[in-house]
Image (cartoon, rainbow, N blue to C red):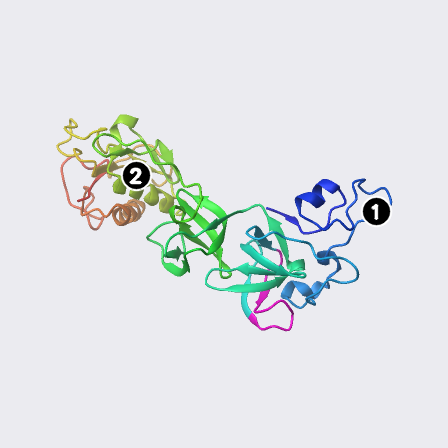
Amino acid sequence: MFRPLTLATSLATCLALSLAAAGCSGGGSSGGGSASTSAASTAPASSASGAAPGSSTGSSAPLKIPAEVALEVIPSDLEVRSGPSAGDPVVARIHAGEAYVHLRQDQDWHLLELGTQQGWVPQSAIAQGKQQTRRVTAATLNVRSGAGTSYRVVGQVAQDTWVAVLDTDGDWREIGFEGQRAWVHGAYLQGAGVSPPRATSSAGFIGLPASGPGFYSYTSAGNRWGVPNVIYGLERAGARWANTGRPRAGIGHISLENGGPFPPHQSHRYGKNVDVRPVRTSGEAPVTISDSAYSRAGTQALIDIVRAEINAHSILFNDSGVSGVSYYAGHHNHFHTSTR
């Protein structure tokens, strides 16, 4: 994930890291120019908690780090201080594996963007990461505990705040946020590489992919078109379902590419109806409510997630032991959702 912030002996590495010319030698380990030693290698071990002096030791120059790059935390628990010295008050704690955007430096101390605040850490406690850095474009952007709007809001970041992207889940981006890993929607990050818009039919429908996190489709591409809020809701439901560790959810008919009659269905005309298979105790084969492999508890959990993510106002399913559903003939091997 990262490369340590140490001074290299090769000229190419020195140039790449924007090091001062002193101490860089084009001849590797040979020749008369001795390699400089970085502050990271000369600082005492206690610097991981912010106790290192705020200046470099000996004649070594601090490593020059450009602004707006990602810096990854090395120690398991790092004190962030209000100023560039070990004597300044601790304002936050961050942790190994998190990454934050570098704003500027003062000798061998570095100012990081943490979310709603900024703080200083010693050079010995961070490494230059490979994470992308992005700027928030929304006036105020909600930060959530998971990759979806159903997850709780843990904070907010203001416009023009810089974040480091740690991971991706669909259109959501995981970031380092004030000592924890949290999620924001990528559409509000400048240049965040959100998936390009999908092909849209003349009816305004988009297609559900053949598979994704937590789901697969058991019908052809021409039968799984729907309004965007339903399609994206199904994908969010799949991502949540994947976290349960159960077999993937099977999604069937939605609508034809431009809606209209869809025999043998009486509905499925407007991109707002979805058929979903019940959950098995194991595997992904079809199952009915009378089969021994049918999981009532799993199906209830899946129905609850799907209902929440697509805002379904009714669900037809013939297991009377499942709550929040209505009986309708023929719905023993799938449940049918309707969204207004």
Give percent across and percent down for residue 282: 37, 39
Task: Name the kind of residue labelled 1 in the image.
Answer: Gly
Instruction: Give the residue drawn at x 39%, y 40%.
Output: 213
| Residue with the mark numbered 2 | 292
Residue span colored magenta? 74-90
Q: Determine the secondary structure under disc 1.
A: loop
The nearer-to-camera label among 2 and 1 is: 1
The CA distance from mark 2 to mark 1 is 76 Å
Give percent across and percent down for residue 109: 64, 62
Q: Please tell me how crowded label 2 is: few (under 14), some (14-19), or many (20+) other residues with Cα within 10 Å.
A: few
Lateral position of residue 24 relative to residue 279, left or right:
right
Q: Determine the secondary structure under disc 2.
A: loop
Q: Earlier in the sequence, mark 2 or mark 1?
A: 1
Task: Name the kind of residue labelled 2 in the image.
Answer: Ser
Q: Residue furthest front?
A: 21
Question: Where residue 33 is drawn, which disc sits there?
Answer: 1
Q: Is residue 44 above or below residue 306?
A: below
* Mark 2 vs 1: CB contact within 8 A: no
**Front residue of this view, candidates 325 and 127:** 127
